[in-house]
Amino acid sequence: MIAGTLERVIAAQTAAGSSIAGAPVVYGTGVIIAVLVALPATTTWVGSLVTVAHEGGHVVLAILSGRGPRDFKVHESTGGGVTEFGGGWGSRPHPGVFVGDITPPMLGLAGAYLVLAGHAWSLLWAAIVLLLAAWAKAMDFFTGLVVLLAGVGIGWVAVRGSPDLQTGLAVALVWLMPLGGVRSLADLRLGSDKSDSGRLAHNTWIPRVVWVAIFWFVAIVCLAAGGARLLGL
């Protein structure tokens, strides 16, 4: 019975993915997400999900490089975040610092290919697993609440939602990551000494503006490539 249900879900998702490129729902969802990211009244809460992805990039690479991350925090007032690292081998956490700003756009690009391949359901469950892992590292109540609400909402759609609703939510997440990443970079500008670009400049002697330019390049390329695929261009 379970196997039959999974087969029906996968078949429905594959059919939806093959026809989603250029569909009105893609354009409409993109506009809605862009407005939510741009409006001051909603950008903090919406941007908090992008921050979770950003800090998640730090956490994953910190684990892979042997620097066990203690926890991370999403700031309630700004939607920004910070990850606290533990010890480990190596003298400086360059890779872990670098990946934060490029993680959301790259997730959005990968998600676009998954949705178009008919794997929206798989994308939602991947998001749930990542959110559960992030929840275990949440530093305070607000951070835990953001992660928990996102996980519960995505989980309900993954379990109870129709294939069309699942595809719609997956498309929304795919738009959110690169658009939110671009908004975060716009707010960052050249960053402070404690920002990712500031720490990279301090540790590598490469000017801060170069690191910011790299972040912008990755974000724009991912947004353009993923967006073009979704819009059927």
Image (cartoon, rainbow, N blue to C red):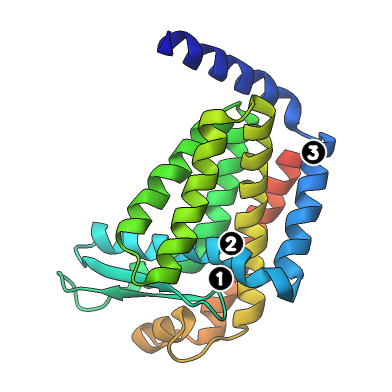
Which class describes the residues within 10 Å of circle 2: few (<14), some (14-19), or many (20+)? some
Q: Mark 1 and mark 2 in contact (Cβ < 8 Å)?
A: yes
* Distance between mark 2 and mark 3 Cα atoms: 26 Å
Residue at numbered disc 2: 218
* Distance between mark 1 and mark 3 Cα atoms: 32 Å
Q: Measuring from the top left, give residue 96's x and y in whole percent.
A: 35, 68
The residue under the point 72% across, 47% down is 227
Residue furthest to the right in view is 24
* Distance between mark 2 and mark 1 Cα atoms: 6 Å
Type of amino acid under label 3: Val
Q: Measuring from the top left, give residue 126's x and y in whole percent.
A: 44, 40
Residue at numbered disc 1: 214
Task: Report the label total.
Answer: 3
Mark identifier at residue 49: none
The residue under the point 40% across, 60% down is 56
The residue under the point 40% across, 63% down is 144
Q: Measuring from the top left, give residue 224's x and y in whole percent.
A: 71, 53
Q: Give SS at disc 3.
A: helix
Residue at numbered disc 3: 25
Type of amino acid under label 1: Ile
Which class describes the residues within 10 Å of circle 3: few (<14), some (14-19), or many (20+)? some
Q: Give SS at disc 1.
A: helix
Tell which circle, 2 or 3, labels the residue nearer the N-terminal end. Answer: 3
Type of amino acid under label 2: Val
Task: Select label 2 or label 3 by which is in front.
Answer: 3
Q: Quadrant of the N terminus?
A: top left
Q: For residue 25, what is the image quadrant?
A: top right
Task: Select label 1 or label 3 by which is in front.
Answer: 3
The residue under the point 71% across, 40% down is 229
